[in-house]
Image (spheres, rainbow, N blue to C red):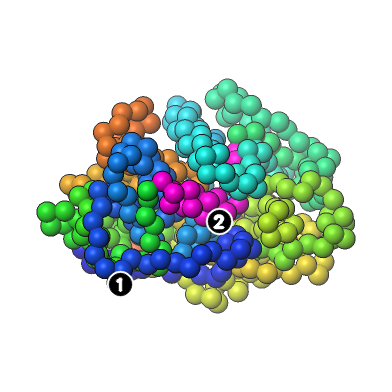
């Protein structure tokens, strides 16, 4: 199959840029063979490679990454590895009780798997911090959504803590928020630092990773043959960990929703600016309304910085231009100014967009697509956790390793078919804009 589109990620991935420059890439050159080929070196691909290295320790595993590790979507998210229900299509993130209990168990399986890698590969605390996160409410509607979510967590038997405006100011230094709902199970990560650290650890475990090696063609002969600009890999078994670019490989056309979200990162704060801000040195807020603004304060490598993330756009082409980044960036500046009046004059240093893949019925695509060809795709907007889960379970399915999570994934339905193109584009973008308008000051 000819690959119809290659990844194009708009704007520099700020999380990656604040780290030390990586070692030079080692693209694939010439022809090679492997027992396993993994396409994609994000959360799903590297988790699949890790699981395969555990299950099949004598096998040769090759990973092909189209760009640089940490420059693609894995280095462009907000860094929340969330354990609890997080349905972006829901008003308060919750869904059906039984399904949410099962999803939470699976999410925690993925987080534990990621945590074990963080320990074994010696990742620093800022790369993987089990600190929890807060659903922040700036409006009465947001506070009501948090109360609804708290009732859902009560029914699930989950712990949480409610913060009033004073408690929110103590954490963030901001007077902007009326209340918050803290849940302890989220891990806050520096996504590029985490993904680069995992890649570095895997390379010492007999896993070969070739960066800047996009797959142009994937053909099944007696084995699968992947062609890149400068070489080929032949392997009997392949795991596609390319999220929405599964469509580019010819699979599930018309069943995946391609969405971009956007972020801006400030320059490093001075010591005086940090003093004026106050609050804790590191925290993460998701909006009580899923269409609102996510905010993080991060400290460590790269300095003390603020990250703002909001706006969703439906883009079935899987591409957006620089003009979009500039336009969305003006909105980020307004969201930042509203929340951080004490930081007037602090500029954004990096702005970027990142690709999400969702399905209408909130299911992932972790299954055998063809003989020896497996997918670990469609993370439904939670790429850190569900990407890790998808890679882990795709490797388990491919090696017939039984587990309750693998059986749940095997039994899940296919993504529902999308409406026709023009209808989907107009309807999705209208719904997104209405959601942002309704979020009010939580946006």
Gap between marks 2 and 1 measured at Cα = 25 Å
Residue at horizontal 44 percent and vertical 29 percent from the top = 102
Residue 71 rendering spot, x and y as whole percentages: 50, 63
Which residue does the image show at 46% across and 56% down from the upper left?
356
Left or right of residue 353: residue 233:
left
The one of 111 and 168 positioned closer to us in this rendering: 111
According to the image, label 1 marks what residue?
229
The residue at the point 60 percent across, 73 percent down is: 327
Look at the numbered disc 2 and give the secondary structure of its residue: helix
Q: Within the image, what quadrant is residue 33 found in?
A: bottom left
Question: Residue 249: x percent and y percent?
Answer: 27, 60
Name above or below for residue 146 compared with residue 291: above
Above or below — where is 131 with respect to 278?
above
Rendering coords of residue 238 (x, y %): 26, 51
Instruction: Determine which residue is flagged by label 2.
Output: 192
Q: Where does residue 208 sit, x and y in percent of width and height? A: 37, 55
> As rendered, which of 275 and 32 lies closer to the eye?
32
The single residue placed furthest to the bottom in the displayed view is 323
Residue 25 in sight in this render: yes
Vertical comparison of 294 with 9: above or below: above
Of mark 2 and mark 1, the one earlier in the sequence is: 2
Residue range corresponding to the magenta coloring: 186-205
Magenta segment main secondary structure: helix
Dot 1, crowdedness within 10 Å: few (<14), some or many (≥20)? Answer: some
User: In the rendered image, which quarter contains the C terminus?
Assistant: bottom right
Residue drawn at the location 88% of the way across and 60% of the way down: 272
Q: Is residue 235 placed above or below 47 in the rendered structure?
A: below
Q: Nearer the viewer, residue 28 or 67?
A: 28
Circle 1 SS class? loop
Q: Judge the density around disc 2: few (<14), some (14-19), many (≥20) Cα neighbours within 10 Å.
A: many
Q: Is residue 108 magenta?
A: no
């Amino acid at each position: 199959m000819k690959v119809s589109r290659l990844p194009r990620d708009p704007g520099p991935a700020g999380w990656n840029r604040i780290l030390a420059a990586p070692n030079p890439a080692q693209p694939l050159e010439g022809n090679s063979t492997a027992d396993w080929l993994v396409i994609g070196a994000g959360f799903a691909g590297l988790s699949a490679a890790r699981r395969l290295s555990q299950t099949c320790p004598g096998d040769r595993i090759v990973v092909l990454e189209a760009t640089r590790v940490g420059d693609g979507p894995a280095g462009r998210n907000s860094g929340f590895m969330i354990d609890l229900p997080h349905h972006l299509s829901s008003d308060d993130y919750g869904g059906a009780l039984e399904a949410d209990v099962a999803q939470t168990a699976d999410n925690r399986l993925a987080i534990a798997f990621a945590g074990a890698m963080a320990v074994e590969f010696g990742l620093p605390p800022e790369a993987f911090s089990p600190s929890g996160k807060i659903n922040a409410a700036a409006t009465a509607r947001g506070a009501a959504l948090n109360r609804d979510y708290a009732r859902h967590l009560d029914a699930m038997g989950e712990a949480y803590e409610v913060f009033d405006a004073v408690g929110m100011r103590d954490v963030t230094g901001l007077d902007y928020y009326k209340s918050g709902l803290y849940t302890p199970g989220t891990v806050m990560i520096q996504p590029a630092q985490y993904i680069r650290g995992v890649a570095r650890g895997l390379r010492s475990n007999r896993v070969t990773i070739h960066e800047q090696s996009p797959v142009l063609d994937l053909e099944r002969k007696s084995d699968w043959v992947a062609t890149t600009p400068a070489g080929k890999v032949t392997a009997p078994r392949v795991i596609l960990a390319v999220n929405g670019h599964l469509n580019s490989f010819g699979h599930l056309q018309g069943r995946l929703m391609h969405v971009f979200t956007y972020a801006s990162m400030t320059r490093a704060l001075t010591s005086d600016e940090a003093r004026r801000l106050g609050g804790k040195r590191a925290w993460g807020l998701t909006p009580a309304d899923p269409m609102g603004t996510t905010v993080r304060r991060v400290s460590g490598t790269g300095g003390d910085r603020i990250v703002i993330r909001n706006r969703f756009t439906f883009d079935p082409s899987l591409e957006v231009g620089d003009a979009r980044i500039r336009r969305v960036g003006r909105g980020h500046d307004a969201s930042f100014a509203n929340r951080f009046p004490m930081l007037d004059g602090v500029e954004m240093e990096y702005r970027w967009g990142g690709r999400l893949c969702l399905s209408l019925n909130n299911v992932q695509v972790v299954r055998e697509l063809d003989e020896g060809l497996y997918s670990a795709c469609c993370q439904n907007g939670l790429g850190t956790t569900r990407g890790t889960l998808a890679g882990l379970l795709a490797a388990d399915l491919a090696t017939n390793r039984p587990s309750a999570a693998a059986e749940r994934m095997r039994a899940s339905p296919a993504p529902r078919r999308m409406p026709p193109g023009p209808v989907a584009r107009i309807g999705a973008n209208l719904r997104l804009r209405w959601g942002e308008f309704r979020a009010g000051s939580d946006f």
